[in-house]
Image: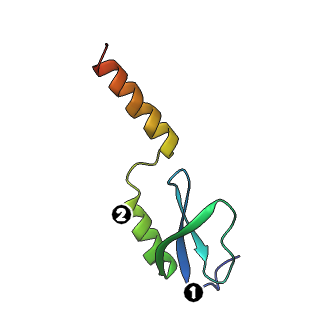
Amino acid sequence: MFEHIKLWKVLINEEDQYSIWPTSKLIPFGWKDAGKEGEKEECLEYIKDIWTDMRPRTLRELTYMDLLETSNPN
């Protein structure tokens, strides 16, 4: 479907999840440009390097809050 696309951009959503999107298409609602553009493999490699915790942001925040509560019982 997108085999002919040469340039891609990296997108990020409000949950800090990443995706790639053709530069020729409008960015979908709920996503924003993450500042990286290039060939598909280059963008995927960038995501691999930067997205080290696959959990959505809200889950990471809840986990952190639970950790704080259990380490401080008062």
At 54% from the left and 76% from the top, the residue drawn is 9
Where 6 falls versus 47 (above or below)?
below
What kind of element bears circle 2? helix
Q: Amino acid at mark 2?
A: Asp
Q: Quadrant of the C terminus?
A: top left
Residue at 40% over, 62% down: 48
Query: How much space separates mark 1 and mark 2, taking CA atoms?
Result: 21 Å
Identify the residue position indicated by label 2 in the image. 49
Q: Is 43 situated above or below 59?
A: below
Q: Residues within 10 Å of mark 1 (few under 14, many from 20)?
A: few
Q: For mark 1, what is the residue?
A: 6
Disc 1 on helix, strand or loop? loop
The residue depicted at 56 percent of the width and 54 percent of the height is 14
Residue extending farthest to the front is 74
Q: Quadrant of the N terminus?
A: bottom right
Tell me where residue 36 appears, x and y as whole percent.
Answer: 46, 76
Task: Please tell me the numbered disc located at residue 69.
Answer: none
User: Which amino acid lies under the numbered mark 1 shown in the image of this protein?
Assistant: Lys
Residue found at x 65% / y 86%: 4
Q: How many marks?
A: 2
The 10 Å Cα crowd at callout 2, few under 14, some 14 to 19, many 20 or more, is: few
Give whichever of discs 1 and 2 has the lower sequence position: 1
Task: Please report contact status of discs 1 and 2: CB closer than 8 Å, yes or no.
Answer: no
Closest to the observer, 67 or 52: 67
Residue 26, percent across and down? 69, 76
Q: Nearer the viewer, residue 14 or 52?
A: 14
In the figure, 52 relative to 71: above or below? below
- Quarter of the rendering containing residue 7: bottom right
